[in-house]
Amino acid sequence: MAFPNTRVKVNVVAKPKQRSSLEVKKIILLLLGIALMAGVYFILPANYTGSARMMLSCLVLSVFYWTFEPIPIGLTAVILLIIMLVFGVVTTDVVYSGFASPAVFLIIGGMMLAKGVNDTTLTKRIAYIFLSKWGGTAKGLLASILMIPQIQSFFIPAAAVRAQLMLPIATMSLDTIGEKAKGNLRKMILLGVAFGGTVSGTAVMTAAIGNILTVELLKEFVGIKITYIQWFTYTFPIWLIMIPILWITLLKSFPLTEEEKHFPHVQQELENKLEELGRLNVEEKKCLAILFIIVALWFTEPLHGLHPSVPALIGVVLMALPGIGFTSWGNLVKINFDTVLLMGVTLSLGYAFNKSGAAKLIGDSLSSEWILYFLHSPVVAVITILVITHILHLAVANVSTAVVTLVPIFIGLSTKAGADPVLICLTASIACLHGYILVVEATPNIIVYSSGRIQQKEFLMPGLWLTGLMSVVVIVIAVTWWNWLGLL
């Protein structure tokens, strides 16, 4: 009896210590963020207006808090909202305008769709189909892990959700493999989940928040509307090329012995799981039909003119309607409200960044002759934007913040240089999306890292290779495909 009592006593003492240490760390980070914000405000040149200085200070605070997360992202979003309102950075209407954007309802609709799809066994079935066919070898398992989120991207408009769905399937496969999965194979497959989730947001406009933000900011600032099919047309060659590049890079980065390359028992295990699911049930068939309607409406946007949020909301309604749907409304509304706040406030930051004059001041500061000269030539402009964005994205790790900070600046610079803002902003958006080097650069990276099975150092070398290769791919596509489409 003494042993259990001792163990309980140790637990009771240890937990408060851990909690206290964690709280102290969070408090220190909160204070550092405030000090950094104040420092930026007073360091900025005196010729900057008070509104512009406070706006830039807010952006610095958002980068710091969203990178280190001393508090939840939704709470940070509300704090930024309050700061802009209390200090009168811009008018109240502008501060709240982000939440009036249809992009917010696209995110809400997307998360509700993902919730509905998860109420069926459809995503598991897709995963088991791939893994039961190719999951018996390292190459086949990695290819399956990479391909499944590409399919999911058409009907699950959130990279975080796609990664969360894939991670347990990947870890289950690794656990089934056993001892062979404790070295390079583990690193390869887990990075496949992270990087595959990132690449899956490239071609489908609704599959990444950065894409949606770029489209909305272009529409707001220069009145240019990019449709779902236009985005797909511009980016699908990059998407198709990056998938095999990602597969080859991970295979080369984590070499395996002959023994580690084969595990037929995994394939058999997944075949059994697929058999357990049986044939497509009624709920899955209804889900597939509704998803087909949504994707068809997205692709035919030029014909009917409906914003992508409308088909998403139509799909949500169909999923919950008695007789037609297959899930309950009560379940569909159980979404992550932090993401809604993040989207709304990020858009508001972008609008306020422009209205406060901060974007113009930063643009003027960057308007040196050599930058404008580089932007004047389309090919050189693509290279310049890729380099600048990749470097800044390492500092401004959060994709949403990076897009909402850089896009308004690049729009101003492209106007001064006489360059096409769509070309400039599309390049910047793609560069922001493809974050491979640091864990904090992309949500799928963070989700995989949070599993505790992989470390930051294991992202570094394959991440550097993929960042370089992705840049080369974009440049090649720009001088060929984009040139043919008239973007260059």
Image (cartoon, grey):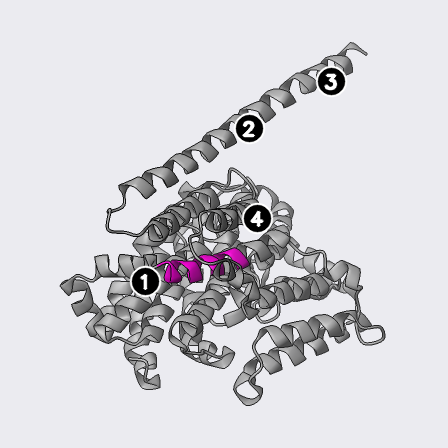
Helix, strand or loop at label 4? It is: helix
Q: Amino acid at mark 2?
A: Glu
Q: CA distance from mark 2 to mark 3?
A: 23 Å
Q: CA distance from mark 3 to mark 1?
A: 57 Å
In this rendering, the answer to whether 38 lies above or below 374 is above
Label 1 close to label 4 by CB (< 8 Å): no
User: Can I make out residue 33 in this image?
Assistant: yes
Disc 4: which residue:
74
Helix, strand or loop at label 3? It is: helix
Q: Residue at x 50, y 41 (%)?
A: 69
Q: Which mark is residue 8?
A: 3
Label 3 close to label 4 by CB (< 8 Å): no
Q: CA distance from mark 2 to mark 4?
A: 18 Å
Magenta region: 344-356
Q: Position of residue 252 (x, y in %)?
A: 39, 55
Relative depth, front residue between 483 and 413: 413
The first of marks 2 and 4 along the sequence is 2
